[in-house]
Image (spheres, grey):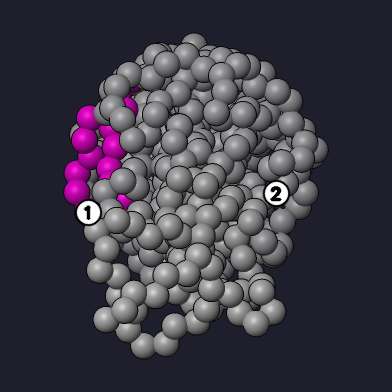
Amino acid sequence: MTNLRVNTIRSGDGNNGPIFEGNLSFSSTSHIVLPKGTTAERPVGISTGALRYNTETGQVEYYNGIYWISTSSYDGSIRGVFGGGSSTQTNIIEYVSINNLSNSTDFGDLTVARNELGACSSSTRGVFGGGNTPTTVNVMDYITILTTGNAVDFGDLTLARYYVSACSSNIRGIFAGSNISASNVIDFITIATTGNATDFGDLTVARGGIGACSSSTRGVCGGGYSPTRTNTIDYITIATEGNAIDFGDLSVTRNSLRACSSSTRGVFGGGATGSGPSNVIDYITIATTGNATDFGDLTEARFGLEACSSSTRGVFGGGSNPADFNTLDYITIASIGNATDFGDLSLSRRGLAACSNAHGGLS
């Protein structure tokens, strides 16, 4: 068969490539180059199944008809990392592969043993901030998520505090709230660099023990204690400093809850109510405003737990009822229903922090 050699094939108007129907095969032992661009350059109005390389995340991704999903979200490279916690403070860091049910694996140690801290992350780096040693600290330290090893000093929060919560985009990390005089402080960091945090603005209600999650553009904070429990949800635009804006209300008033997210949906789980620990899971659509809707139940009612996620799955870990748990359970974020057993942490504890390299703020 005669070979056909051309440099470029374009449609009649010169703007698009060819459309091949039926089977298309490549016999070369070389390679194929996918279309590529940043997250902001993702094409719109395209067909389900489209494939591209994201130069910002360093991952191949496909379009499922609603949003872009990394192809690596179904392998062991999607990690959730849990650090600190315990009623007497620990420096333990351990990780799970979010899409593979299993017990946690040792990662390394925080620079300072502490509990009631918060964590945020980019697709490569996790940052842990604040906590009790039992002295309240402003310490931030960081890890490279796909390696193992001890955390390294990052800088300082603007305020030494505990019961702090965090969320992030792929660029910027947000730390919000505190139970130090029920603080309304929000500050931010640039995750890829090191240095001290900078003031961002204020929460609508001063409080600590919040559940925080994010899309790539918006951070959402729900619940907390100030000094009474609240069902308040408020939000910020991560790239723009300023005070938080009212979003709506949680389905149950509670504090010491945690949250995770896909690029479109935020899910809040657990917490402490006036009548005891809660197993409630509720959810919001991050791009809108409004009250949270019932999602299902955790496997155990508990407070002081932590959560992390991939673009499709959320994992809740630890907590107390009042005895501390090593429980890990998971949900499928896009659906509703009760959580399912995932595995166990190496240490039963509460007041820990978690982050991942594939949460909704990175999509």
* The one of 361 and 274 positioned closer to us in this rendering: 361
Per the image, the residue denoted by label 2 is 235
Q: Amino acid at mark 1?
A: Leu
* The one of 65 and 214 positioned closer to us in this rendering: 65
The residue located at (38%, 19%) in the rendering is: 151
**How far across and how far down the image is residue 277, in percent?**
42, 48
Q: Quick one: label 2, few (<14), some, or many (20+) residues within 10 Å?
A: many
- 94 within the magenta span: yes
**How far across and how far down the image is residue 225, in percent?**
60, 38
Residue lying at the far bottom in this picture: please name it. 22
Q: Could you tell me if residue 340 is visible in this image? A: yes
Q: How many numbered discs?
A: 2
Using residue 353 as the reference point, say whether residue 288 is left or right of it.
Answer: right
Q: Is residue 198 above or below residue 336?
A: above
Per the image, the residue denoted by label 1 is 101
Q: Secondary structure at mark 1?
A: loop
Q: Quadrant of the N terminus?
A: bottom left
Residue lying at the far right in this picture: please name it. 242
Give the residues in magenta.
91-106
The image quarter containing residue 166 is: top right
Q: Quick one: label 1, few (<14), some, or many (20+) residues within 10 Å?
A: some
Using residue 248 as the reference point, say whether residue 60 is left or right of it.
Answer: left
Number of the front mark, 2 or 1: 1
